[in-house]
Image: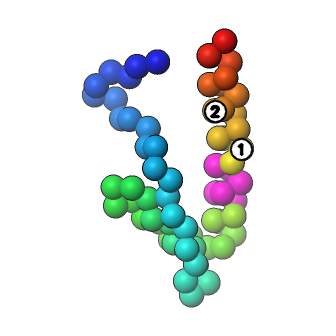
């Protein structure tokens, strides 16, 4: 599936998480950065894992 050139392209590089002073720091590509509480980071991580599983199944379905 090709995207029009003006559409935002999905990022292929993962973000890197670290912990400092009881907070979680997420550094992503292109200067994207977030600071989260431990709870918010855990819930975000779980949401990302669930969404990635759905996206993989959608990708597999469209490849058939």
The stretch in magenta equals 43-48
Residue at image point 40% right, 19% down: 2
> Label 2 belongs to which residue?
55
Q: How many labels does the image show?
A: 2
- Say which label, 2 or 1, has the lower sequence index: 1
Residue 64 covered by magenta stretch: no
Q: Quadrant of the C terminus?
A: top right
Residue 44 covered by magenta stretch: yes
Residue at image point 70% right, 28% down: 57
Nearest the viewer among 1 and 47 is 1
* Residue contact between numbered discs 2 and 1, judged by CB atoms under 8 Å: no
Image x and y of residue 25, in percent = 51, 72
Per the model, the C-alpha gap separating discs 2 and 1 is 9 Å
Image x and y of residue 52, in percent = 65, 41
Quadrant position of residue 37: bottom right
Image x and y of residue 60, in percent = 67, 23
Residue at image point 33% right, 21% down: 4
> Label 1 belongs to which residue?
50
Quadrant position of residue 44: bottom right
């Amino acid at each position: 599936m090709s995207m029009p050139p003006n559409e935002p392209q999905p990022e292929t590089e993962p973000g890197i998480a670290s912990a400092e002073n009881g907070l979680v720091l997420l550094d992503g590509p292109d200067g994207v950065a977030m600071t989260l509480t431990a709870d918010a980071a855990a819930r975000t991580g779980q949401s990302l894992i669930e969404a990635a599983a759905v996206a993989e199944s959608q990708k597999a379905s469209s490849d058939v």
